[in-house]
Image (tube, helix red, strand yellow):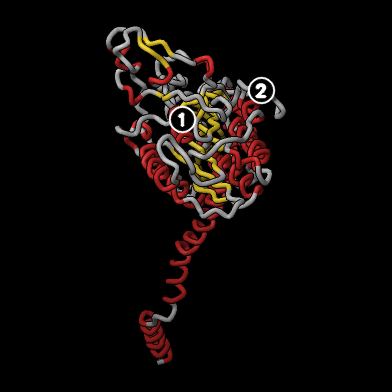
Amino acid sequence: MFIQSVSSQAKRLASRFARHDGGNIAMTFAVALVPLLGFVGAAVDYSRANAARAAMQVALDSAALMVSKDLSGNPTLSAADVTTKATAYFNALYTNTNASQVAVTASYTTNSKDGSTVTVNGTGVVATDFMKMVGFPQMGISGASTTTWGSTRMRVAIALDVTGSMDQDGKLPAMKTAAKNLIDTLKASASQTADVYISIIPFNVMVNVGISNKNASWLDWDTNYGSCSKSSYTTKSTCVLAGQTWTAKNVNKWQGCVTDRDKTDNYDALKTPPDVNTPGTLYLAQNYGQCPSEILPMKSAYDSKESDSSTDDNTLKGKINNLIANGNTNQAIGLHWAWISLQQGDPLNTPAKDANYKYTDVVILMSDGLNTQDRWYNQASQIDTRQALLCSNIKNSLYGSTIVYTIQVNTGNDPESQVLKNCASPTGQFFPATSISQMTQAFANIGSSLTKLRVSK
């Protein structure tokens, strides 16, 4: 009986044990714990790898910028030297200790149409703490950074108001200093001769193209200034077209001044090359008692070696130092000749552009007053109308989309010049200045803007 009772009880216990499911929770948790720990471990490993990758990218970016600076000053570095420099900069900057087997390479291209480019690449591995248990002992990381500089060469024409009012309130000496500082800024952004060219266009009612051009074919000597070998022809154009010889008169008294081109066909607002067969395209010579300083065609900023005190009229700073103030205001003619100084061929024979580079053409127009006189008018509104047409053409993509900066130096409580404001390119490039310090800052801001345009990351 006892044996049977024990046997029955054992069967009942066994049956209850088989039916009991309380222990399944522990078993399920034990089974699930492995992948849960795997996911947590993977997240930790990925976090470490991402931190190493982010630190690598920051170091690569900085190394690329540093190498590009070295290359801009020494573009003949070999490929091996470029990689050596990039590696040295990277190692000094990369402080993450999770990565190993880190390798850096660099490549360099120059003289491309899109500018000089350096690319720095980095690779490495991060050892895993958890994922190695499932067959992934390490994770690869990589990054790359590309820096481009000098992607555009620049031609900058600076038209400076030298009218009589510039002698007031210390404007002329302050303008000279600010303009020379701008030249220094542009020079600093250049690494070779052709990177930045600058022209200086002093203007009042007229501009001075230089007495050395008195026999230039692109000058129009009016009837009052010459005669034809056949007296029936009374203008230079008809005389030359008839195969006769035009002899200019009073040329030796000419100080070099020209006034606006003909407005009948809007040549005063166009960059049409001068053509003896089209009289309106020629530049009208005038004997003018208050002729400003002669214009200075494009000069390399990089090759500009003169000191701030230079008095050499053939240099950028020397030209600025020699400026004097006289005459009335005709902003349009200064603006027009600034635009012309950007063009190849007659009358100024600007250096040709290299097809392997992009170029940005810029005009800076500074004036301290409102328009007062041009070839035809003595009313500001009429002169402004001609100037507005010129401004529109300069910025028009049909004619090359030149960038225009304008500065109004207004120390005499004149109204804000709408024609100067509207003439500026539409990105905050009009600078109204009511004091000398604001004028100085305007030139500095333009220099900073141009540097950013020329040197890009």
Residue 405 visible in the current orientation: yes
Residue at point 34% right, 37% down? Answer: 397
State the residue position of label 1.
337
Label of residue 237 in the image: none
Q: Specify whether 381 is left or right of 182.
A: left
Left or right placement of residue 186 versus residue 417 in this view: right
Work out whether mark 1 precedes mark 2 in sequence or the reverse, and give the earlier one.
Answer: 2
Up/down of 112 relative to 102, above or below: above
Q: Nearer the viewer, residue 6 or 96?
A: 96
Location of residue 416 in the rendering, given as x and y in whole percent from the top left corner: 51, 53
Element under label 1?
A: helix
Farthest residue toward the front?
231
- Is any atom of residue 105 visible in this view? no
Task: Mark 1 and mark 2 in contact? Answer it, CB < 8 Å.
Answer: no
Q: Residue at x 38, y 84 (%)?
A: 16
What separation in Å lies between label 1 and label 2 (alpha carbons)?
25 Å
Q: Is 294 placed above or below 173 here?
A: above
